[in-house]
Amino acid sequence: MAESISLVVEFTGGLEMLFSDQRKHRIAIPAKDAKGQPSNIAFLIQYLCESLMKDPRKEMFVLDGSVRPGILVLINDADWELEGQEQYELQPNDNIVFVSTLHGG
Amino acid sequence: MPPQTCEICHAARAQILRPKNHARICGPCFISTFEREVAEAVTTNNLFQPGERVAIGASGGKDSTVLASVLKTLNDRHGWNLDLILLSVDEGIQGYRDHSLEAVKRHSVQYGLPLKIVSYADLYGWSMDQVVAQVGKKGNCTYCGVFRRQALDRGAAMLGVQHVVTGHNADDVAETVLMNLLRGDLPRLSRATSIITSTPSAAANASSGETGVSFTSVKRSKPLMYAYEKEIVLYAHHRKLDYFSTECIYSPEAFRGSARTLIKNLERIRPESILDVVQSGIDMAKLVPDANADGPVSCTGKGKKQSYAYAVEEDDGKGGCGSTNGRSSGGEMAEMERKLRQDEQAEANDTEVEITSKSKTNVHTQAEAAKLNSSNRPQPIENVVTIRPKQINGKGMKNRQATPLKQKLGQCERCGYLSSQSVCKACVLLEGLNKARPRTEVEVGGE
Ligand SMILES: [Zn+2]
Ligand SMILES: [Zn+2]
């Protein structure tokens, strides 16, 4: 079996409802993507959409191949913009948080 | 990518990329910067009087939770001496509002702030669950928005508070500016972009002499209107504030507010756009012929502190369902009024007997309205009949369409709420609801 990376992924701000109403998920993803490149955030998002998300409303999480605008992504508690966004290469035990700003007043 | 260092303290790892200026700062520096900026918005705009009693419109959602937390923090830190109270509206939506109210109750304990809850059921005789059972899911947000605005004012009146703060953020204001632009409704910009709005208390006092509660002279302000939604969410995240974020069950399309989507797409490409749209809205509002109610106000007076934009019956959605789509765009209400007018006309063509036979239903409305108006004396039933199609028709609609904001402020003849029309929006909606309510249900509901 191929090498894998274990991560903690969290969904908050209303996104948890798209992921079995569960905030915190411990997952293991392949260490390399289909092309043999180290797994990055872009790969993780695709993986989450295909493997973890049971809700059919994919567009509430992903639009045009990226996280829907209005959803914040935190990599080890820092804005993903500071870490290279989709290109950030995942490290073992990284904590990735997806926070919706689109819910609630 | 190597870890970046905070631009402020030059010590900790940068965690936040600020949308307004691209500053890269750490969590603790972000918290103090965010709080300082809210404090600046409050002080430079003179939002509060020392010792003022202020109700925080609290829904349990992210914006009002952050607002309550920050105001409590700043009030203690700077000795503003404000008497802060949480004010929540219970729309009566099972499985949604009952849960979010639990969050507000926790905040009340956590922040040590008293909590007052006012419910649609008590105020109007209708919970939103009942409204939806009556009118269906489509368009019910209009009811909710109109009812909420009054509910907050009435709650404030019950508390003896003349100032309600709401959690509107920069994204909300930018969204409203865009909506108004897209609708060609520039006169509304003034209200949407003013950090503080007020109904003129002189007019309110003069006309409310008869009843005890003058709930019309309530100031509204938006201390967070320059704060990005992103930063509000990050503030809640880094302060570990618990808030409620489930979508209202009655706005299934909440994810698709087109103006909101546009704002969020712009933010991704150029985050400054949000505050730029807000500022553009403020600047454009100054160019629009005066939108205030009582006579002309000179241009020179416009910029002064005392020249608040009037907010009459604005259904501002905030603190409620929080759904972008749910926020009434204004057009829905006009549509509703048109429909009610048609119903009225259809009915006017009917016999007078038909109207009389409905009086029982109307008594219920009247009783509810009277209750709000504080006095306990029995309400004359004749009043019911005074509301005839012509008034709603002739006075209201034309003015509204042509010059929506050259409003003449008066009081709703049914409930006393400040209104530009003889019957306020809530009473118009209630009339429609009560007419359609089956007789048996009226009796149950009237107990
Ligand atoms: Zn710092
Ligand atoms: Zn009324």
Image (cartoon, coloured by chain):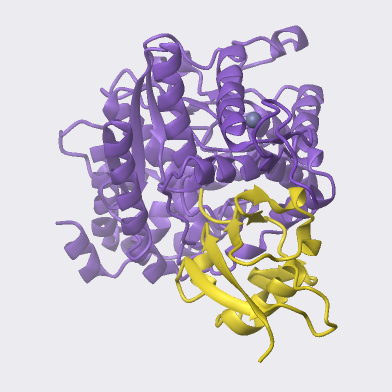
Chain colours: A yellow, B purple
Residue B417 makes an appearance in the image: no
Eyeballing the image, is B443 above or below B44? Answer: below
In the image, residue B149 lies at what x, y percent?
A: 45, 40
Q: Residue at x 45, y 10 (%)?
A: B49
Eyeballing the image, is B179 above or below A24? Answer: above
In the image, residue B176 lies at what x, y percent?
A: 68, 43
Residue B20 makes an appearance in the image: yes
Using the rendered view, name the quadrant where residue B336 is placed: bottom right
Using the rendered view, name the quadrant where residue B98 is placed: bottom left
In the image, residue B85 lies at what x, y percent?
A: 33, 29
Please name whichever residue, A28 or B206, is drawn nearer the observer in this view of the structure: A28
Q: For the image shown, how many numbered marks are present on the structure?
A: 0
Please name whichever residue, B270 or B174, is drawn nearer the observer in this view of the structure: B270
Q: Residue at x 78, y 63 (%)?
A: A86
Q: Residue at x 76, y 50 (%)?
A: A81
Please name whichever residue, B46 or A56, is drawn nearer the observer in this view of the structure: A56
Quarter of the picture containing the C terminus of chain B is: bottom left
Q: Taking B18 as reference, is B122 left or right?
A: left
Q: Taking A19 as reference, is B93 left or right?
A: left
Eyeballing the image, is B91 above or below B423? Answer: below
Q: Residue furthest bottom?
A: A1
Quadrant of ligand 1: it is: top right
In the image, residue B57 lies at what x, y percent?
A: 42, 37
Please name whichever residue, B183 or B39, is drawn nearer the observer in this view of the structure: B39
Q: Taking B331 as reference, is B251 left or right?
A: left
Q: Residue at x 35, y 24 (%)?
A: B84
Q: Taking B150 as reference, is B296 left or right?
A: right
